[in-house]
Image (cartoon, rainbow, N blue to C red):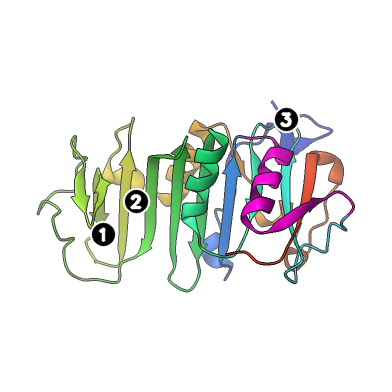
């Protein structure tokens, strides 16, 4: 339920539905964990320290990163620019919780949603341009249906790989607990929305992010906690 004093508190789902039109490269990790606990682990990984007195707009320039949680939410968010989906797995394993990595590359026009729980891959969804006119090696020919037993492609199990008839786009999906159709996964915005909703998590649109290049104009009261990490490098 939305709170009129804090509309973000009741929002869930996928809020980056125009990301493919924004010319942005974007990576975010969402963790079902306390902001401070997540911040301390990230600081350890990045050889940094958690600061309580950093300015909110000093997050760029290789000095600070921001970890935040919206009021009324149970997931904490952290953005970075290393295209390290394995970081989500590390955090999930160390914190013994669920973590989601979401990344989109404007350069390749491709994206990924990756859910881990206690370090285990639970779901993965890839979408974007198809850079190969060839069929996927090892995938059954003439099928776009869900495979009850996942098929190993280049060492990674998948339940469904769908290439559009014009060969321009390709979608792939793996899940340890749900079945989907090709019709569902090729509708990327609605499918991503369903994935985030299934975890009761909100991936907000860019105007809700505390980064100078997005020129935010936010009431900071919508946040439950904001933490800053001063780091020497993000590996």
Q: Residue furthest bottom?
A: 107
The answer to whether 163 is drawn above or below residue 67 in the figure is below
Crowd tier of the residue under label 3, counting other residues whose Cα lies within 10 Å: few below 14, some 14–19, many 20 or above: some
The answer to whether 155 is drawn above or below residue 190 in the figure is below
Measured in 3D between alpha carbons, the distance from the residue under mark 3 to the one under mark 2, in whole angstroms, is: 31 Å
Q: Is residue 68 magenta?
A: no
Pick the residue in front: 12 or 112.
112
- Res 233 quadrant in image: bottom right
Where residue 191 appears, as percent x and y from the top left, is 42, 43
The answer to whether 193 is drawn above or below residue 16 in the figure is above
Q: Are marks 1 and 2 in contact (CB under 8 Å)?
A: yes
Number of disc labels: 3
Pick the residue in front: 136 or 189.
136
Q: Earlier in the sequence, mark 3 or mark 2?
A: 3
User: The residue tagged with tag 3: helix, strand or loop?
Assistant: loop
Q: Which residue is mark 1?
A: 164
Which residues, given as a range, are shown in magenta?
A: 33-53
The answer to whether 158 is drawn above or below residue 57 in the figure is above
Quadrant for the C terminus in the image: bottom right
Pick the residue in front: 3 or 92.
92
Where residue 186 appears, as percent x and y from the top left, is 34, 51
């Amino acid at each position: 339920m939305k709170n009129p004093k804090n509309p973000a508190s009741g929002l869930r789902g996928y809020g980056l539905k125009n990301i493919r039109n924004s010319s942005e490269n974007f990576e975010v990790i969402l963790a079902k964990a306390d902001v401070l606990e997540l911040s301390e682990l990230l600081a350890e990984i990045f050889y940094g320290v958690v600061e309580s007195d950093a300015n909110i707009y000093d997050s760029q320039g290789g000095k600070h990163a921001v970890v935040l949680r919206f009021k009324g939410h149970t997931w904490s968010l952290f953005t970075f620019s290393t295209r390290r989906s394995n970081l989500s797995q590390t955090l999930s394993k160390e914190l013994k919780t669920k973590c989601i990595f979401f990344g989109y590359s404007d350069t390749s026009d491709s994206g990924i949603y990756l859910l881990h729980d206690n370090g285990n891959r639970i779901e993965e969804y890839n979408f974007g341009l198809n850079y190969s006119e060839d069929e996927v090696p090892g995938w059954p020919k003439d099928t776009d249906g869900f495979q009850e037993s996942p098929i190993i492609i280049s060492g990674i199990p998948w339940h469904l790989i769908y290439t559009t008839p014009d060969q321009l786009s390709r979608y792939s999906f793996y899940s340890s607990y749900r079945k989907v159709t090709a019709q569902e996964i090729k509708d990327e915005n609605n499918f991503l929305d369903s994935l985030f909703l299934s975890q009761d998590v909100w991936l907000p649109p860019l105007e809700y992010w505390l980064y100078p290049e997005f020129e935010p104009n936010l009431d900071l009261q919508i946040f439950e906690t904001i933490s800053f990490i001063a780091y020497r490098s993000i590996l």
